[in-house]
Amino acid sequence: MAATGPAPDRGSALLEIRDLSVHFGGLRAVSAVSLSVAPGEILSVIGPNGAGKTTIFNVVTGLYRPTAGTIALAGTPIATLPPHARARLGISRTFQNIRLFRELTVRENVRVARYARTRAGVLAALARTPAMRRERRAADQTVTRLLARLGLRDRAEVPAKHLPYGDQKRVEIARALATEPRLLLLDEPAAGTSVGEAAELMELIRRLRAEGLTILLVEHHIRVVMAISDRVAVLDHGELIAVGPPETVRRDPAVIAAYLGEGA
């Protein structure tokens, strides 16, 4: 069953990718891919290992530069912007391999991300101006609310390295939400989770979409993809081979062949 919630407005895309290609020397990681994500939509990108899924995430968030093609967020070209500028425009992400500050506490990990939305500079911080202190209190309140929302309030002062894997995943999501994104990119959030944790994750993603967040998801856990996605895009060897509603994509012969082989 596809995700339930407000119907995405397909009249104007929040994220627009056109003819995107990414080459690493002679390797074509992504070839002429075009995708759009509507406001309030959950679009999942699936495909075999090496299909180019995470490469697209890295290009959207500014870790890689495209070889060709364009990327726009709400009509603003972003392909040449650095990652921090894209974060300020409203793009945030998690990583396939968890990238927390292991020695920092859960609260500190999320607070670091919150600074993307603060205004006080180095001099104000050193002088501890009243404006800086007010901003710090507001940031701490936001962090506390996020930890409660993600079920992490009782882990707030625990160093990230001591958390179980599922909790570390939730800290990454809380950190991404701390930047107040319009577009949230989740890179295999269900990987390594238990059945119960995957179910909790699906409920969280549904809640986030219901609150107006647009989500681009890369996930190998097909049950999660089919349960929460409005549309599914399938990559194979860097090329887009199918895109559409989950049930339509699931029956597509090209998709079946990519996953199971030509004889399936």
Image (tube, rainbow, N blue to C red):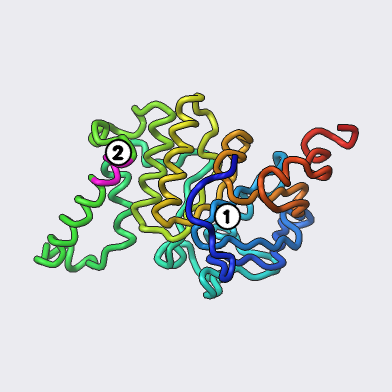
Residue 143 visible within the image: yes
What is the secondary structure assignment of the residue under circle 2? helix
Q: Residue 192 location in percent, x, y?
A: 53, 28
Mark 1 Cα shell of 10 Å, populated few (<14), some (14-19), many (≥20):
some
What is the secondary structure assignment of the residue under circle 1? helix
Magenta: main secondary structure equals helix
Q: Is residue 17 left or right of residue 139?
A: right
Q: Residue furthest left?
A: 130
The one of 60 and 235 positioned closer to us in this rendering: 235
Mark 2 Cα shell of 10 Å, populated few (<14), some (14-19), many (≥20):
many
Give yes or no for residue 146 being in the magenta stretch. yes
Q: Earlier in the sequence, mark 1 or mark 2?
A: 1
- Residue at image coords 73%, 46%: 248
Which label sits on residue 106? 2
Q: Quadrant of the N terminus?
A: top right
The answer to whether residue 162 is above or below residue 100 is above
Disc 1 to disc 2, how far (Cα)? Answer: 25 Å
Q: Which residue is mark 1?
A: 58
Give yes or no for residue 62 being in the magenta stretch. no
Residue 79 visible within the image: no
Q: How many marks?
A: 2
Q: Is residue 99 left or right of residue 34?
A: left
Which label sits on residue 138? none
- Residue at image coords 23%, 65%: 122
- Residue at image coords 72%, 40%: 48
The one of 64 and 45 positioned closer to us in this rendering: 45
> Magenta residues?
145-149
The one of 114 and 182 positioned closer to us in this rendering: 182
Please name the amino acid that badge 1 sits on. Asn
The one of 245 and 153 positioned closer to us in this rendering: 245
Q: Residue 77 location in percent, x, y?
A: 55, 74
